[in-house]
């Protein structure tokens, strides 16, 4: 089960990397050629999307770390807590970056409804991940406290 989750993380990370490297620049060039009135937004948008890749890969890496800790039977440790914190803050960073990007497009009268829906979808997914990480982190803190109390009584 854990191996399939690790494989899923690698596939997701690799797919996003390939899209960012190969498809995104050519799509930006095509859109800039088709809509010359918005061509000035090409590089700020590419920069913004590449900027969101940083917290995404931090979250993917820490998800991988959590899976390795579970595999080594060290799931209830401070290392898992720290990784969950990184996943939580990475998700929040993605939410903030997409909100800023959508406001930027709105102020430039370039926020197409399909871009709005895509941005809202990404924000919603990041919110779900942040919420899940926050809940699991709170539960993990309680479990670590109980474990430490149990270790002290023995």
Image (cartoon, helix red, strand yellow):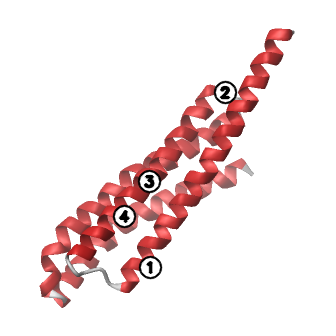
Task: Tell me the CA gap for discs 2 and 4.
Answer: 34 Å
Q: Are marks 3 and 1 in contact (CB under 8 Å)?
A: no
* 33 w.r.t. 75: above or below: below
Label 2: which secondary element: loop
Question: Disc 4 marks which residue?
Answer: 99
| Residue 30 on image: x %, y % | 22, 84
Label 1: which secondary element: helix
Q: Quadrant of residue 82?
A: top right
- Classed neighbour count for the residue bearing mark 3: other residues with Cα under 10 Å, few (<14), some (14–19), many (≥20): many
- Classed neighbour count for the residue bearing mark 2: other residues with Cα under 10 Å, few (<14), some (14–19), many (≥20): some
In front: label 3 or label 1: 1
Mark nearer the N terminus (3 vs 2): 3
Left or right: residue 133 versus residue 96 is right
Left or right: residue 52 versus residue 85 is left
Question: Disc 2 marks which residue?
Answer: 77
Task: Tell me the CA gap for discs 3 and 4.
Answer: 15 Å
Q: Are marks 3 and 4 in contact (CB under 8 Å)?
A: no
| Residue 23 on image: x %, y % | 33, 73
Task: Tell me the CA gap for discs 3 and 2.
Answer: 23 Å
């Amino acid at each position: 089960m854990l191996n399939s989750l690790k494989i899923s993380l690698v596939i997701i990370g690799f797919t996003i990397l390939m899209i960012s490297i190969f498809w995104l620049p050519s799509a930006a060039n095509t859109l800039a050629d088709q809509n010359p009135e918005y061509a000035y937004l090409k590089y700020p948008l590419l920069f913004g999307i590449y900027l969101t890749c940083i917290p995404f890969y931090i979250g993917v890496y820490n998800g991988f770390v959590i899976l390795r800790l579970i595999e080594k039977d060290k799931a209830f440790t401070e290392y898992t807590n720290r990784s969950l914190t990184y996943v939580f803050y990475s998700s929040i960073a993605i939410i903030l970056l997409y909100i800023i990007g959508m406001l930027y497009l709105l102020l430039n009268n370039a926020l197409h409804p399909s871009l709005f829906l895509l941005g809202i979808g990404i924000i919603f997914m990041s919110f779900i991940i942040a919420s899940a990480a926050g809940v699991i982190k709170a539960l993990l803190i309680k479990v670590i406290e109980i474990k430490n109390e149990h270790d002290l009584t023995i």
